[in-house]
Image (cartoon, rainbow, N blue to C red):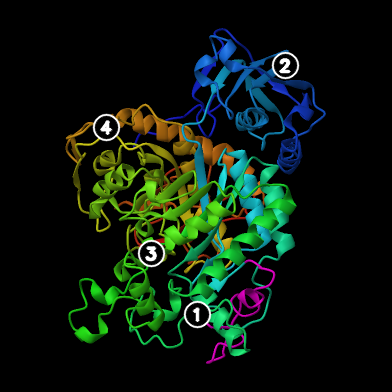
């Protein structure tokens, strides 16, 4: 196939709103930079200096970068980018000027300046140009599941560094789930003394039972202390990243329920989360019983949330960073035996959650509005009242927890949902429904944005596949968040079948943002996490900051499928080639400098009938090596080479420093 060289000297990830290379301008070298006006960044100067140091950039170089705070709307050239995260940058041989309305904009300008550089080169080069830039979405997120398998504080910090460099601004930290509780809460010590540990204790008085590959003796510290969390809040704030804490409930709460049961066994049931007289039989989506759902009818459950919210709010206050947004969770509070596919189960086992709880039976009698079939909705409204009482401005939830309600039923100023329905299961109608309910929408679609799914279809690739058989970097890059139906033309369903999706006859939903999710059931270690999240995170950063020319508007009644030909594929291909070339040739080195051991994709290859090996990589600037003796010796591949028609050939990709490599591909 034809191989094209792509010039990425003008490319930045994520792509700016407007970039204009000066006509007749020069390309020039610099030894480093010195920044004038760094104090204007406030606390962000700590993050900016730290990132430059980690990337090996001299801060006492010969190229001066001048920062200034101005009103961008006063200038007709920048009026259309006015906003808190926007910036304007002019690069000349005499120096660079970055102007913005707020420190966040100046910070982004510095990150874009770094984005133009190939920091792996001993000599840095620039082109004269002008950039006027603003973000596509206010919310540009990355979710980390620390509950199923724990992520170290250092891994979270490295992720925050990467988010800052590529302009993501919300870290959604999922602290809790059925399998673990990962944040110390003063006064509720059992949450971490029991709920953060897994061991062999059939009564679960001292730990949760071993699961998800943890082994029977998980004695190491597997939670964040109060001090750890305050440190992370400050670290993120210094890099223009907000931490959104999630405490999932009423479902996916087994770690909390069991921890408070251990407390109750010691004589304190003030915060008990399950009714000891409840005999309801349920099976949750994770195959747990009723102990994985908080009983919403107990006064002690309300006290638990009040205590939790108060303590987390105080941590934020001690960090000097208000708790403005709180993630409630809210997903999958149901008995799956009531759904399709369980006809072989006896009808008496198909019970609504808590339908046999004496506490809930009493609640039905005293409150006619209480609906046992809508406990997630009831608990969402209950928790929201607690948040509003504490002055918290926003509640966020997984969208199914709020379905059946509208924004008007909640007391916080804002209510946002992570939208996680799949396109091929009719997700576009669910999107229209949630938007009609008045909720802010954060696109979190599993068939494009879940990073616990494989990168490609291969049994050696890690990950689940219930919503997508693979989520490659290309697939994430091509996701059109504001025109969901368009994705039916550029991708297939989970099973590789073509889709046909028609845009509903409604006004286009208002999308606040998007985020990638890194669930951790199959991700045991930090290095496995880095590999699954990176480099897919950068494709999210690209789409969340920049709307591409090949993305089409929401258009009611328009149908998309593999043959409609509405998406300009040539523009898409050119855009992706530029993105992936920049990614492979410049940005992966920066990632490694941040201490992130990213995934190196395996090469593709074939041996023709005359014994000629041809190989390639989806990631430009990645070296390929091959072996004809089962991996005992390796040779570098640079062009088609004769290996012999009867040879079994092994291939792998290797980074330039040899530190990271792909899995081995065998060609027979």
What residue appears at the point 71 percent right and 48 percent down from the top-left corner?
Answer: 235
Residue 210 lies within the magenta run: yes
Q: Main secondary structure of the magenta part?
A: loop
Residue at the bottom extreme of this rendering: 202
> Label 4, label 1: how many angstroms apart (C-alpha)?
45 Å
- Which numbered disc, 1 or 3, marks the residue closer to the eye? 3
Q: Mark 2 = which residue? A: 95
First in sequence: mark 4 vs mark 1: 1
Quadrant of the image occupied by residue 547: top left
First in sequence: mark 1 vs mark 2: 2
Say whether marks 3 and 2 touch (CB < 8 Å): no
Image quarter (top left, top right, bottom left or bottom right) of the N terminus = top left
First in sequence: mark 3 vs mark 2: 2
Residue 116 lies within the magenta run: no
- The residue segment tinted magenta is 183-211
Check disc 3 and report its element: helix, strand or loop: helix
Check disc 2 and report its element: helix, strand or loop: strand
Query: Dot 2 surroundings within 10 Å: few (below 14), some, or many (20 or more)?
Result: some
Give the percent coordinates (x, y) of residue 224.
67, 65
Image quarter (top left, top right, bottom left or bottom right) of the C terminus = bottom left
Q: Is residue 547 above or below residue 329?
A: above
- Which numbered disc, 4 or 1, marks the residue closer to the eye? 1
Q: Mark 1 = which residue? A: 211
Give the percent coordinates (x, y) of residue 392.
57, 50
> Label 1, label 3: how many angstroms apart (C-alpha)?
26 Å
| Disc number placed over residue 376 in the picture, else none | 3
| Disc number placed over residue 567 in the picture, else none | 4
What residue appears at the point 65 percent right and 47 percent down from the top-left corner?
Answer: 322
> Label 4, label 2: how many angstroms apart (C-alpha)?
40 Å
- Which numbered disc, 4 or 3, marks the residue closer to the eye? 3
């Amino acid at each position: 196939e034809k191989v094209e060289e792509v010039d990425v000297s003008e490319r930045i990830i994520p792509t700016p709103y407007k970039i204009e290379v000066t006509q007749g301008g020069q390309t020039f070298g610099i030894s480093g930079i010195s920044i004038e006006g760094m104090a204007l960044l406030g606390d962000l100067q700590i993050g900016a200096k730290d990132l430059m140091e980690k990337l090996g950039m001299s801060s006492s170089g010969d190229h001066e970068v001048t920062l200034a705070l101005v009103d961008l709307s006063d200038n007709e050239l920048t009026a259309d980018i006015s906003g808190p995260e926007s910036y304007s940058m002019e690069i000349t041989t005499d120096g660079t000027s970055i102007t913005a309305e707020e420190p966040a904009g100046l910070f982004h300008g510095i990150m874009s300046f770094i984005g133009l550089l190939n920091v792996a080169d001993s000599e840095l080069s620039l082109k004269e140009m002008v950039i006027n830039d603003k973000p596509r979405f206010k919310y540009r997120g990355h979710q980390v599941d620390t509950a199923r398998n724990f992520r170290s504080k250092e891994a979270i910090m490295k992720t925050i560094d990467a988010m800052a460099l590529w302009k993501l601004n919300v870290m959604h930290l999922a602290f809790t789930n059925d399998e673990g509780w990962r944040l110390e809460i003063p006064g509720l010590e059992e949450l971490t003394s029991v709920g953060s540990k897994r061991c062999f204790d059939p009564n679960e008085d001292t730990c949760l039972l071993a699961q998800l590959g943890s082994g029977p003796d998980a004695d190491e510290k597997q939670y964040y202390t109060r001090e750890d969390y305050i440190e992370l809040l400050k670290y993120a704030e210094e890099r223009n990243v907000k931490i959104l804490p999630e405490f999932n409930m009423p479902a996916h709460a087994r770690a909390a329920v069991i921890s408070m049961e251990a407390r109750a066994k010691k004589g304190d049931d003030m915060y008990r989360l399950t009714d000891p007289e409840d005999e309801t039989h349920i099976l949750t989506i994770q195959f747990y019983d009723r102990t994985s759902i908080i009983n919403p009818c107990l006064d002690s459950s309300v006290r638990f949330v009040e205590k939790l919210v108060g303590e987390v709010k105080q941590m934020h206050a001690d960090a000097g960073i208000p708790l403005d947004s709180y993630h409630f969770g809210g997903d999958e509070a149901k008995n799956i035996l009531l759904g399709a596919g369980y006809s072989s189960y006896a009808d008496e086992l198909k019970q609504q959650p808590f339908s046999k709880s004496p506490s809930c039976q009493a609640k039905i009698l005293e409150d006619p509005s209480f609906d046992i079939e809508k406990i997630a909705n009831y608990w969402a409204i209950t928790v929201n009242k607690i948040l509003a009482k504490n002055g918290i401005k926003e509640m966020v939830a997984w969208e199914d927890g709020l379905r059946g309600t509208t924004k008007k039923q909640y007391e916080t100023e804002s209510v946002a949902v992570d939208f996680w329905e799949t396109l091929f299961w009719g997700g576009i109608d669910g999107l229209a429904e949630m938007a009609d309910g008045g909720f802010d929408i954060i696109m979190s679609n599993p068939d494009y944005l879940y990073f616990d799914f494989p990168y490609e279809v291969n049994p050696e690739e890690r990950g689940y596949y219930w919503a997508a058989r693979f989520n490659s970097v290309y697939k994430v890059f091509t996701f059109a968040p504001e025109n969901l139906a368009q994705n039916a033309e550029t991708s297939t369903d989970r099973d590789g079948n073509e889709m046909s999706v028609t845009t509903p006859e409604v006004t286009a939903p208002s999308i606040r943002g998007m985020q990638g999710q890194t669930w951790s059931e199959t991700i045991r270690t930090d290095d496995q996490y880095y590999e699954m999240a990176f480099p897919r995170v950068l494709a999210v950063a690209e789409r969340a900051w920049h709307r591409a020319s090949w993305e089409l508007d929401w258009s009611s009644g328009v149908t998309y499928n593999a043959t409609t030909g509405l998406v300009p594929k040539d523009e898409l291909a050119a855009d992706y080639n530029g993105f992936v070339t920049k990614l492979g040739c410049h940005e992966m080195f920066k990632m490694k400098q941040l201490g992130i051991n990213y995934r190196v994709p395996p090469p593709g290859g074939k041996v023709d009938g005359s014994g000629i090996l041809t190989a390639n990589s989806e990631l430009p600037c990645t070296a390929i090596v091959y072996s004809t003796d089962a991996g005992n010796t390796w040779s570098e591949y640079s062009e088609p080479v004769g290996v012999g028609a009867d040879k079994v050939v092994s291939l792998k990709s290797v980074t330039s420093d040899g530190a990271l490599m792909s899995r081995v591909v065998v060609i027979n």
